[in-house]
Amino acid sequence: MKLLYVAPIRLPTEKAHGIQIMETCAALSRAGVEVELVVPDRKTHIQEDAFEYYNIKERFRITRLRTPDTVSYGRAGFLFYAVIFALRAARFARRAKADVVYTRDPTTLCVCSLCGVRPLAWEVHTAHPGVPAFITRNVRAFIAITRGLARWYEARGVPADALHVAPDAVDLAAFDAIRDREHERSSLRERLGVSADSKIALYLGSFGLYAWKGVDVARAAAELAPDVKWLFVGGSPEECEELKRGAPGQVLTHPRVRREDIAALICAADVLLLPNKSGDPASERDTSPMKLFEYMASGVPLVASDIPSLREIVDEHTAFLVPPNDPQALADAVRVALSQPREALRRADAAHAAVQAYTWDKRAEGLLAFLERCRSLRH
């Protein structure tokens, strides 16, 4: 199978979608698919090669299409950029004669559909009520990252046999490579300037991009548990400074780290935090956080919000689940995880066993089988 993955992204990008797209392409390539990733030639401040930046060994073709970079000109500028790229990608796709044209971008999907590009596969990461039904009827395969999202599309007329659920995934090898956890623990505490016996609750991810990720809830929880070091990693230097402003001494921050350093960082913590909020469909229904699977792979206890999207993957046997939007509940659960090491280890081991089903390669195998089935059903 020849698959054209069309993505209007800056590559490399420090944002999570870059990792997800590159890992998906690499895993499909390992599964025997001839993959070509098509992106705009947008400039990026990251100087490294995309494969090196994302620490991906599998090589596949990356094609860059000339596209005016008008993203900085606001919403209209971004729309112009997205449409021009999609038009050029559609022309490229017609010449490429791929078996599948795959995208997760609604603008690319709409333009390719209107330009007669077929067959189309759409990986959906949120609900898109604005995409017209006559466009979605041209989509051969829908890939939803949560069951809740799949139900949303099915309720709006997408046939069940055109839907496949594929949560995000993890590279287990990165965690298997961590041989000396005590060294990682002591090294992290030394870098942070805290005592060697400090207990660390770690949040890894963006700080201010999406309010529903619950960074504010975790920061409030930190004030209720001064005996724990609350480490927030993943913001820009400015975001780190803002999060620290007025915070108690147990709140620690660190800017984004290199992808190759994430596994060691996670394994050096005592508790891992996923404080997603309720009240937003993006959090309750649509999200499949890559860090959830990384947390599970680490063997470190996980404290997570009890919301439907996360419950698709974890439960009381694999995590400490807490009511969302509740700093006190989050602080209490962190204390419980630290004070009950045998129970915490039991849940962490169960999470590690469960995450074996969520590797990028297994995700790609499921995707490939689904795409092949969709092709055969329509022939």
Image (spheres, rainbow, N blue to C red):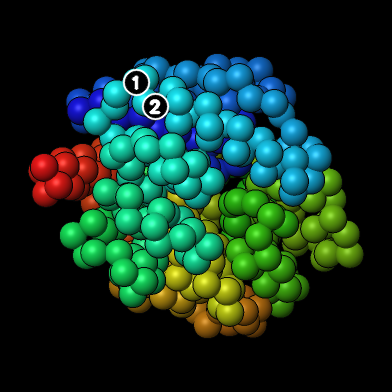
- Element assignment for label 1: helix
x and y percentages locating residue 4 in the rendered image: 36, 29
Side of 47 where 132 appears, left or right = left
Q: Residues within 10 Å of mark 2 (few under 14, many from 20)?
A: many
Which residue bears the numbered disc 2?
93
* Amino acid of disc 2: Ala
Pick the front one: 107 or 241: 107
Pick the front one: 181 or 60: 60
In the image as oriented, which residue stretches furthest toward the right?
A: 246
For residue 187, what is the image quadrant?
top right
Separation (CA) of disc 1 from disc 2 = 5 Å
Q: Is residue 252 above or below residue 184?
A: below
Q: Is residue 344 above or below residue 131?
A: below
- Element assignment for label 2: helix
Which residue bears the numbered disc 1?
96
Side of 371 where 116 appears, left or right = right
Q: Who's the residue at 46% across and 77% down the image? A: 306
Quadrant location, the N terminus? top left
x and y percentages locating residue 314 in the rendered image: 35, 67
Q: Is residue 240 above or below residue 157?
A: above
* Amino acid of disc 1: Ala
Q: Who's the residue at 81% across and 40% down the image? A: 73
Pick the front one: 47 or 242: 47
Q: Residues within 10 Å of mark 1 (few under 14, many from 20)?
A: some
> Tags 1 and 2 in contact by the CB under 8 Å rule?
yes
